Image (cartoon, rainbow, N blue to C red):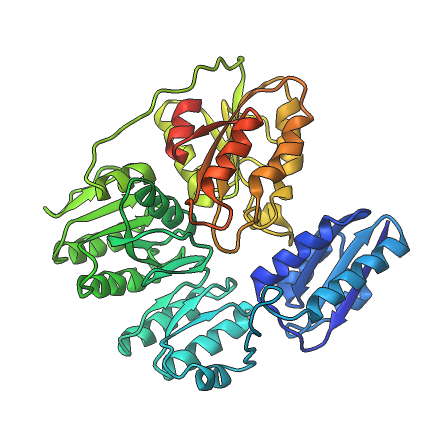
Amino acid sequence: MSTVNTVHRGFYLDSVALMRLSRQLSQMDGVDDAAVMMGAPANHAILDTAGLLTGAGQSATPGDLVIAIRATSDDTAAAALAAAEGALLAPAGPAGAAPVTRARTLERGRAHMPDANLVLISTPGHYATALAHKALHHGLHVMIFSDNVSIDDEVHLKREAARRNLLVMGPDCGTAIISGVPLAFANRVASGSTGIIGASGTGIQEVSCLIDHSGGGVSHAIGVGGRDLTAPVGGQATLMAIDALAEDDRTDQVVVIAKPPDPDVAARVLNRLADFPHPSIVCFLGAPPMTLPANVRQARTLKDAALLALRRGETLPPPPDRTARHGRIVGLYAGGTLCAEAQMIARDAGLAVRSNVLPVSGAEAGDQGGECVLIELGDVALAVGGPHPMIGPAVRDAPLAAALEDPETAIILLDLILGQGAHPDPAAALVPVLAKADSRPVVLCSVTGTRADIQNRSRQIRTLEDAGVVVAPSNADAARWAV
């Protein structure tokens, strides 16, 4: 193997663009692994762990871009580097489209769009905090896609935002829909009267898409970041989002989605919802039944939350006419909240569950303990600097092939997540792996997305079903069928 690094000094790309480029390079013939990352110390450690860091890469500073390639030969590595260089210099936007204006500073961006009132920040975490403070100073709402922002900085940012009557979504906020416009990883859903507030990106995606499937619509979906409902942050963004939706003429109900919050923060959220002028729904995955205000209902699953928003009762479609062999359930998830929902359903059914992430932890990918092994492949401990599985579904190939070949596997659970930023055809990427298995366990999959998404949910489902995959209407249905 030949491992090479090259460093571009003072060159920045946002994390989604970096993950896409990493995926493209990893798929080249003869390339064993590839990563394109900013030169932050945390990324040095990731590259080193993956065996991708050389002396050249070690010299990179947080403001530099590192391209790291491991290939079967020097010539192949050089070709991959040349492809990366060409991609970095390519014009922004699709071929034939109008040129995209590149503003290298917030001030230039504001000069180009003086009426804008929101900035989406996707810079390395230690830069994101300063940029967010600057945006707040200019009177802009902020969505922080970046992670690696300290919790102390998050608290300070959200306090400053509240003082200015502005909203900070994030850090690590991957999904939002504002006035019908999907931001970051989000889906194209119909406009409607349901407002969604989520400390979970894939949770927002699943609920908004399920509402869309049944003829409902979304006014806004406000991501708040995964730590907003912890004790240190205190739900500051969630409370502001509730107040904002209370004043929005298009919103007549709100759904709040999160993993179990801090109890005191949960009480604060419920008290604020008690004053909300319309019905409300809370879906705190895995939380026990709570004492609720009269206008608030509690949903056990993401599907339940969507049904309550649609004012419909529970409908569990019958499981398919398939007989699974004796063995364990193996779940390989791109969505962290979808993995958590499956954990909850399996535990409710009395199964022994192992996972690499909370709420059930203590297993790694490939761990064979428990009747149900559910792995979140997007977890940073497994991603090791590679693209998130929503962007690069090849991350799932090796564990999926192993599960297919394991005679102890009875059922495999998968999720496909469509929408902006996601892989353009994730179902087609799965088919070659599935085709290699001579005899295989039952494969169950849910598809989070809509017909309006660029990947087209209906087309993705047809591809999966043609490959022998059983497609469930929702992630919760897939997990219940498996159980």
Q: Quadrant of the C terminus?
A: top left
Horizontal side of residue 78 vs 476, given as left or right: right
Residue 361 in view of the camera: no
In the rendered image, residue 330, in percent from the top left (x then y), is placed at 53, 28
| 139 shown above or below 84 | below
Estimate the x, y position of residue 306 in percent, counting from the top left. Answer: 28, 41
Residue sitting nearer the eye, 363 or 220: 220
Residue appearing at x 79%, y 57% in the figure? 80
How far from the left and from the top, in percent, is residue 233?
A: 34, 62
Quadrant of the rendered image containing residue 61: bottom right
Q: Give the answer, above or below, for where 240 lies relative to 134.
A: above
Q: Residue furthest left?
A: 294
Seen in the picture, residue 266 relative to 411 is either above or below; the reply is below
**In the rendering, at what x and y percent does residue 113 appear?**
43, 81
Count up the numbered dots.
0
Indicate the quadrant where residue 304 lies: top left
Residue 196 appears left or right of 368: left
Relative horizontal placement of residue 115, taking residue 391 as reference (left or right) = left
